[in-house]
Amino acid sequence: MAASAERLSARLKGEAVDCIPNMSLVMQFAAQHIGAPLSHYYQDYNVLCESNFAVAETYGLDTLDAISDPYRETADFGAVIFFPEDDLPLCREPLLKDPADLKNLPSPDPLAPGSRMRDRVDAIRLFRERAGGQMPIQGWVEGALAEAATLRGVMPLLYDLYDRPDWVEKLLEHCVEVEIAFAVAQVEAGATIIGLGDAIASQIGPRGYRRFALPYEQRIFEAVQKAGAIGRLHICGNTTPLVEDMAYSGAQIIDLDWMVDLESARRRIEAINPALALCGNFDPVAILYQGTPDDVKEAARRCRAVGGPNWLAAPGCEVPRYTAPENMFALREVLCETGP
């Protein structure tokens, strides 16, 4: 059986593999798998690493994943993040309450001792030490627009796009430099993939995406590629209007959420760059969490049939926390069926 790193490398080239790589994102599910409170998963890289190794071994995942939550950079910029014992982290007040606050926004060092970004870098170092090159290691950064949304607040930022677009671009310029430094630090620590999350981009339409998201994604992925890693773009929600633009992001892997028609998206992206690998995109809730093992198999086979020769397996977004083990086993089983 091929090691996961070898399997992913071959699949990205469209070559034959023993099993389709399972690129599912596991966060809350991973913590639950080892019985760890979520606050420990978010704040202690040892817990994050232990849970990812355990999930990968049990369910046949093909990545070790340092993703946890969207507030690592935000915390290091100076925002106060609350960590309930066993629930999602919270940012109750945006750091940039007023546009004038931008002039005081720091540029945090991703390697600063005790910082949340450093905790992720340390997770990647531990993954590298223990995986020995056999497993792809996935680091993660926020897109500049996504980071701007956590610093400013989603609704204020959406108003800012219309009321003060030049100010938004100054904020994005500040954010992108931090994200580039964070991405490169993770690659230098051992990450072989850098995922970029830009969830808010699905809310602003193609024209807004081309001005406020795409140029900054391109700069981050250019730095990732120069550092020697693979870029993976993840935008939650219905990105159907953005598919062609996403193909120009510089990512080598493009995640598609379940609202997007995978077959249509493949045709549109292939016309631009047939080497891009699509990842996804069955419904993580209706299929993986609420469905049966047969539902999971049927959905994965359907995606495989239309996803192309370098299609990668995953639900459209994160694996829900209490997903039934038998459904995860079903996904592992169907990905090793013979076929293209």
Image (tube, rainbow, N blue to C red):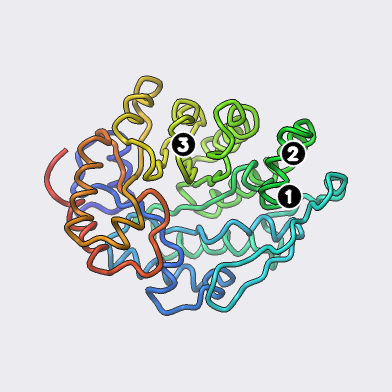
Residue drawn where x is 24% and y is 35% of the image: 306
- In this rendered view, identify the residue nearer to me: 86 or 215: 86
In the rendered structure, are the residues bearing label 3 and label 2 in contact, judged by CB atoms less than 8 Å apart?
no
Residue 11 image-quadrant placement: top left
Q: Are marks 1 and 2 in contact (CB under 8 Å)?
A: yes
Tag 3: amino acid:
Thr
Amino acid type at circle 1 is: Arg
C-beta proximity under 8 Å, tags 1 and 3: no
User: Residue 32 in the image: x percent, y percent?
Assistant: 41, 74
What residue is disc 3 on? Answer: 239
Rendered-image quadrant of the C terminus: top left
Q: Is residue 26 left or right of residue 75?
A: left
Which amino acid type is marked by label 2? Asp
Q: Please identify the quarter of the rendering in which residue 168 is found.
A: top right
Q: Within 10 Å of the Cα at label 1, are there few (<14), some (14-19), or many (20+) other Cα atoms?
A: many
Q: Which residue is mark 1?
A: 152
